Image (cartoon, rainbow, N blue to C red):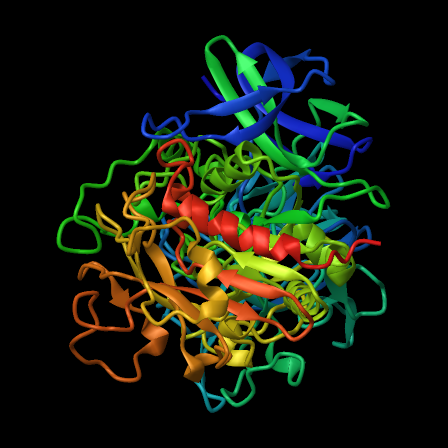
Amino acid sequence: MTLTGYLNTLSAEPGEAVDLMMSASADLVEVDLVRLQHGDDNPAGPGRKILPVPEFIAQTVRGGLRDVHLGSCVVVPSVGTQSVEGLSLSVLMQPTTPSSGREQGVLTLLAANGATVLGIVVDAAGRLGLRGADEARLADLTIAWRRGSWYRVQLEVPAGGPLVLRCAESRGLGEEVALEIEAQPLPAGSIVSSAVIAAASCRLDGRQWVPDRVFNGKIERPEIHRVAAEGSRIPVAEWRFELEPGSAVAVDVSGHERHGIVVGSPARASTGHSWRHEEVDFRKAPEQYGAIHFHDDDLDDAGWEPSLRFTVPEDLTSGVYAVELRAGDVIDHVPFVVRPRDGEARARTVVLLPTFTYLAYGNERMVTRLDFEGDQMSDHAIRPGHRDLELAEHPEWGLSLYDVHSDGSTCAYATHLRPIPNLRPDYRAWLQNAPRHLSADLYLIDWLTEKGYSFDVVTDHDLHRDGAALLAEYDVVLTGSHPEYVSARMLDALDAHVHSGGSMMYLGGNGFYWVTSQDSARPHIIEVRRGPVGTRPSEGAPGEGHHSTTGEPGGMWRQRGRWPNHLTGIGMTAQGWDSRAPGYRRNPDLPEECAFVFDGVDEEVIGTFGLIMDGSSGDEIDRFDVDRGSPAETVVLASSTGHSDFYFLAGEDVMASRAGLGGTQSPEVRSDMTWLEKPGGGAVFSVGSICFLGSLSHNGYRNNISTVVANALDEMLRRPSRQR
């Protein structure tokens, strides 16, 4: 059975209306609201805790399956109603999958009813062709496509004469090799009124664009002119993709304002045919960045109509909640955060859920692309969980920032307006065979609840929107297990918090790593441009390292001098995945002023247990290093006791290829637990491990990891409160 959904937001206040978009093969679905406390049903832990919300009255809504249509293009609603005779079309193109076995539209002119009048295509065999009404094949031109080459395609539609299709390959230094073919004239009186770029057609179905035969590759400077009898060329439309690259608008500079709608979030700020390999900032040489890279698997918004609009109950306390969908024996949970209402009393402690990271990994499909088994990167066989299997059945739900497009190019944008099976409380990551991301962060929610701490919950999206003001009255900020993706505004807010008397507990690993931006006009979209440095699943094309949405340089924050170490005392050092993650050995030379952290702890080595990889220091881990931004006054409380050779030093820390990078060989392959006093009176406690939170509930929450975290949090709460 198909039963899934998504919400129009990842967080909401009490009293706020929220839209549920749902797809279900069942006729009727019961919709309820629940509170998420613990999602892992591992018998070694406390079990799943999904609690009822009495304030919400369950409702029954109609089911029905919903489609998602992948692919990007530009829709031009009007090119002016006019005869096709006398028009001249021109476009620059760089196809990336010309022999894909399917037809791909390049530039199509449409009638008022949306039917094709005339279109330039790349056919299933890779030939450049013309298509007329009723998909009639008018001409085909065989091109010896070269990977990375640019082609100028021109189509002349003279009155009463044959159509002329030309294609010229640019081979650099002005050299071009041209081919030409003629076709029979179109029927007299053929009228066009709209156009589609990078697809054969695109129709609007409710809120959802449905592109057909999407082009894979780059397109630049599409133009339509009318050729007068004396030979002069009058602009009908001239689109310049280098203008407003952070928007969903294709700007027409002809003077007629026949602007296009960019559908599906293709890659903008892309190098064009004139890029000279000298400037890598599109803002400084916009004329060299006139291309859009289209993909047949791009996705901006699934576009489903709401199945239900509900109001978050007025008295609901801040926390992690979910819309529960039930049909027969099948249940799905669509999570969101209830944040405190603006202006109301707040707890002293707030959990910052890393929703930017959730989106970056959302619908990650690497299990089908990479080999992590055996002597590769893990000592155990990989068995995809039920959420991964669900995702594999639905390629139409789109990709993550860890996947590559069908043409091999890296993904730069991610959206939350679609079903995301691995953003669920019961998700178990295929590599760790354990919770990761939200499902792992619920370990912290459960621990705080069971220990009786009062806390609020907010998201990265909230912090990016509200900035430092969101944290101004909180005394302690607790991170999730993997806050890898952060924006400059978020870093500014966290810096302001810890430098103005606030404290922070960094309870994860590989944090504050990648430069991330949010589309200001479409806040459901985040953007990441990976460069040639960093531990990464793929990298962007040369010259395309700046974010189209903000213009800022992408890559790792450390490349911009914002070392995670400076904020937290530690930074990413290694990653690895095996069956047994080690614990931490206490620092025998611990300063007396930090001894409180281990009050009530007798063991020299702590955290030799856990629900993730059977230990507390594993997955991706961070270390203290003054040369990489760690303040010298950072105190190392404990360090991991030794990792296997499935762990390797992060590539960005390796200046040259050499032996000795494995966990048993390199002393830098470790996670450090640290304490850092800040000048404003606050402090930062860091653990440097994604696995860490999985150890909190061991032995009914009575264990040395639980004790250490409680000691650190209690010390922070003993300090003067910032609340007025």
Front residue of 75/106: it is: 75
Front residue of 201/344: it is: 344
Quarter of the image for the N terminus: give it: top left
- Answer yes or no: is residue 662 visible: yes
- Residue 41 on image: x %, y %: 39, 26
Displayed quadrant of residue 340: top right
Quarter of the image for the C terminus: give it: bottom right
- Residue 209 on image: x %, y %: 65, 40
- Residue 554 on image: x %, y %: 55, 72
Taking 371 as reference, is 343 left or right? Answer: right
Residue shown at 65% from the left, 54% from the top: 718
- Answer yes or no: is residue 9 visible: no
Taking 237 as reference, is 217 left or right? Answer: left
Looking at the image, residue 372 lies above or below residue 280: above
Looking at the image, residue 195 lies above or below residue 331: below
Q: How many marks?
A: 0
Looking at the image, residue 501 lies above or below residue 476: below
Displayed quadrant of residue 566: bottom right
Taking 239 as reference, is 273 left or right? Answer: left
Taking 702 as reference, is 155 left or right? Answer: right
As drawn, the residue found furthest toward the left would be 375
- Residue 584 on image: x %, y %: 31, 57
Residue shown at 76% from the left, 24% from the top: 310
Residue shown at 39% from the left, 42% from the top: 694
